[in-house]
Image: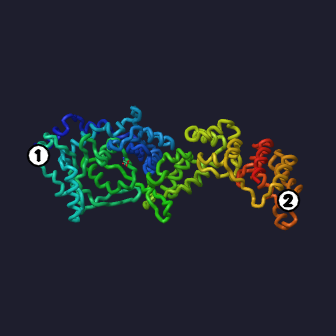
Amino acid sequence: MTNLELVQLIFPDISLTVEDCEARYPARELPEGACVTRFAPSPTGFVHIGNFMPALISYVLAKRSGGVFFLRNEDTDKKREVGSALRLIMETLAHFGILPDEYEADGQTVGDYGPYVQSERKEIYHACLKRLVERGRAYPCFCAPDKLDALRASQEAAKQRTGYYGTYAVCRDLSNDERAARIRKGDPFVLRLLSEGHSARRVRFRDGVRGETDFPENDQDIVIMKTGWGLPTYHFAHAVDDHFMRTTLVVRGEEWLPSVPVHLELFRAFGWCPPAYIHHPLILKRDQDDPSCVRKISKRKDPEALMEYYIQKGYPIEAVVDALMTIINSNFEDWRTANPGASFLEFPFSPRKISVSGAFFDLDKLDSISRERLSRLPAVLLRDLSCAWAEQYNPILLDWIRRDEDYYTEILNIEREQPKPRKDVACFCGIPDYLWYMYDDVFEAREKRYQWNEGTVRVDAAEILDLYLAQYYCMDSQEAWFGAIKELCTALGFAAATKDYKKNPGAYRGSLVDVTTILRVAATSLRMTFDLYSIMRLLGPERLRRRFDLALETL
Ligand code: GLU
């Protein structure tokens, strides 16, 4: 029996050919140097930061070069698939401003190189599998899983390299007649690549991060089509899809680096030119329980491993993107300092500046980038962004905002829009803790401890608070307000300037700081707050009176 006859037996219904596919998916017409990149997630129902990273790099490189970035749904592992996963992936990407040029979603295909869902590309895979069987570069293998387990055990016992290769690849030696007989009998089989590689030889290639790299050639007869569904394995689909989708640059995690020899062999078996590769490092973090341990960020242990975390917490998208760019490209931070308002797409991203040794992700760093970002936003924009976030994630904050948007904006505006704005808030979910005491019902309902100075006594506090409201409450301007507090100090025997008090503490009941602390704690219960003048101005005299009364009850 010829290879051609065997092919007809395996794929009786496939008339599509490799040549048809070449014609259907012609080379893309793009400017010189434009990259075609892709994000190729498995639809598992979440977006891991380690998957988001290649999407971000791919997007940047495509956009910067005037190329194309597309999304391919790698759903050939039906066991792992989650129904709404693709939608979630698209939404997550879109949240961070990453919009694929080509994709398939909700039954709609955008782009000429689809289908963009692997399970819909079966005919293309089969046309390509046919070609390899025809050329004698692929063959059916009938070895059952228990037989393969036994093979592995015997190889391990004999201290041999494990796998299906060379003389261990027993189904290589079956004749086409034997193969046909078993197929007709209904024996389950997979298709394997017939490798021509040799482990003693090296294959060289250029990785965008590492430069020239070499590995032993592949000599494993890897599975290229699984049983049952007749769907391809990742390796085979990668070669076929990235060839016919005309991908020029594959960005993926470094866990795929050892597979490159297999991929190059597959491209070569078809006579295709492989894409360029960038293998980015693992995302690492310091273990909280054991700070000496730096480990891979993990979905199981670290909530921040999933991109959803940043969305739910309400981190500004630019901060998350900047934090990732910072760990992936060593000169991003300097560039950002020099270009605070620029889009990350303007950054001259260089794969050679990606660290080989691992990208260290640190939430504290993200927080600091984020605080900086949020502190620079105009109050009105922060109001709108936090309101949109609260609509989805925080009904309590939403209620506060909706009661009086102007009041909320005024609070946000305290010590903002000035050269050194406050940097208290790292994400929208931090806003309630930042300004809760500006809402009377919240303030009154909250269990709180008044942070009086040690030694503050009721009579002193009552005297200060009463006299303040009776005679010194003045909101004409910040200067006038401060001047009035100084006068109050003098009237009550407190030093109006701290330096006077320091020079001669015995001459005073206390200093200006003691008085302002009493006012601040009485108004908010806290010793550390944003600007006291703004707090008092926004609360107004009646609300302050009630707060002072409540405060005095605690002394
Ligand atoms: N589906 C593969 C993964 O999720 C894609 C790897 C690649 O980008 O080629 O790991």
Q: Secondary structure at mark 2?
A: strand
Q: Ligand 1 near label 1 (Cβ, under 8 Å)?
A: no
Circles 2 and 1 in contact, beta carbons < 8 Å: no
Taking the spot 23% from the left edge, 57% from the top edge, the residue there is 163
Mark before the other along the chain sequence, 2 or 1 = 1
The amino acid at mark 2 is: Phe
Front one among 467 and 28: 467
Front one among 31 and 381: 381
Taking the spot 86% from the left edge, 63% from the top edge, the residue there is 508
Q: Quadrant of residue 351?
A: bottom left
Front one among 296 and 459: 459
> Residue 203's spot in the image, x, y percent?
29, 59
Q: Check the picture and name the quadrant holding the N terminus.
A: top left
* Left or right: 460 in relation to 370: right
Is 207 drawn above or below residue 246 in the view shown? below
The amino acid at mark 1 is: Glu
Residue most toward the right? 491
Q: Ligand 1 near label 2 (Cβ, under 8 Å)?
A: no
> Residue 436's spot in the image, x, y percent?
67, 46
Residue corresponding to mark 1: 178
Q: Is residue 400 visible?
A: yes
Number of the label disc, if any, that sits on residue 13: none
Q: Check the picture and name the quadrant holding the C terminus.
A: bottom right
Q: Is residue 36 visible?
A: no
Distance between the Cα atoms at labels 2 and 1? 104 Å
Taking the spot 23% from the left edge, 58% from the top edge, the residue there is 152
Residue corresponding to mark 2: 494
Q: Secondary structure at mark 1?
A: helix
Taking the spot 13% from the left edge, 43% from the top edge, the residue there is 182
Q: Residues within 10 Å of mark 2 (few under 14, many from 20)?
A: many
Q: Quadrant of residue 151?
A: bottom left
> Residue 478's spot in the image, x, y percent?
80, 49
